[in-house]
Image (cartoon, grey):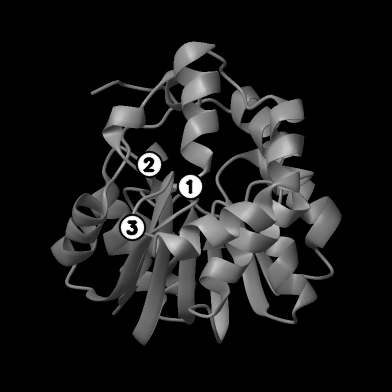
Amino acid sequence: MSEFAFKDIDQEGMETLKAISSANKFNAWMYQRIAADCSGKILEIGSGIGNISEYFIKNGAEIYLSDLRDNYLEFLESNYKSKAAGILKMDIVDPNFEEVYAEHLGTFDTVFALNVVEHIKDDTLAMANIKKLLKKDGKAVILVPAYNTLYNSFDEALEHYRRYTKKTLNKVFDNNQFQIQKSSYFNAAGIAGWILSGAILKKTTIPAGQMKLYNKLVPIFKVVDKVIFNSFGLSVITVGKK
């Protein structure tokens, strides 16, 4: 397993988030995939620059945004302070988690994390702390990259410890006694672009031009996922109840 030192400024991550920020159709699609399972008082772990957060806000959700890095938090404060229910600096694997975040324990109906857990070495601890933040019967919604066979230069640059399958992601939920509600794959068409840019061309950030083209084709890719019944994809999503 690779070891990654924490970077105060995550340049590759910021460039990737900015490339994805212009992909409105893709971001709306991701939001649509998880929105039905997110209700009540919501916390987003690892909001980044708010690519998905803004959809929740536009639809009137009571959502709290969070991140670990100061540069992302500054962006969130500048763009969403008056719109979100709150903005928190949060380390989901802080060694003193219960003490540091005592006021937030057991207060959320939904906690979701999109493309976050793969960055955390101890994903079981991350899920344990997510569970502590939830009310009784609250839901955790987790989206992560799928299939270790797809691990390439993108993953390395973005400091991903691993990729998942439904089985391995569900095991992290099981380890924390969540009741799994559903689990499925997302974005099958994205696999080809990931292989081309990351494995063949050895890129370390998502090319903006490629993301722009992909965004135009999202309506077709949504149909593809439906036709294959979300049986495989570039990402995997699991929903579990406390």
Image point 52% across, 54% down: which residue? 90
The quadrant the N terminus occupies is top left
Image point 53% across, 25% down: which residue? 7
Report the Cα–Cα distance between label 1 and label 3. Answer: 19 Å
- From the image, tell me which residue sits under label 1: 115
- From the image, tell me which residue sits under label 2: 118
Image point 39% across, 78% down: which residue? 139
Q: Are marks 2 and 1 in contact (CB under 8 Å)?
A: yes
Identify residue type, mark 1: Asn
As displayed, is residue 101 above or below residue 41? above
Residue in front for this viewpoint, 109 or 142: 142
Residue in front for this viewpoint, 84 or 157: 157
The label number, if any, that marks residue 231 in the structure image: 3
Q: Position of residue 10 (x, y in %)?
A: 60, 28
Identify residue type, mark 3: Ser
How crowded pointer 2 is (Cα within 10 Å; few <14, some 14-19, many 20+) is rated as many
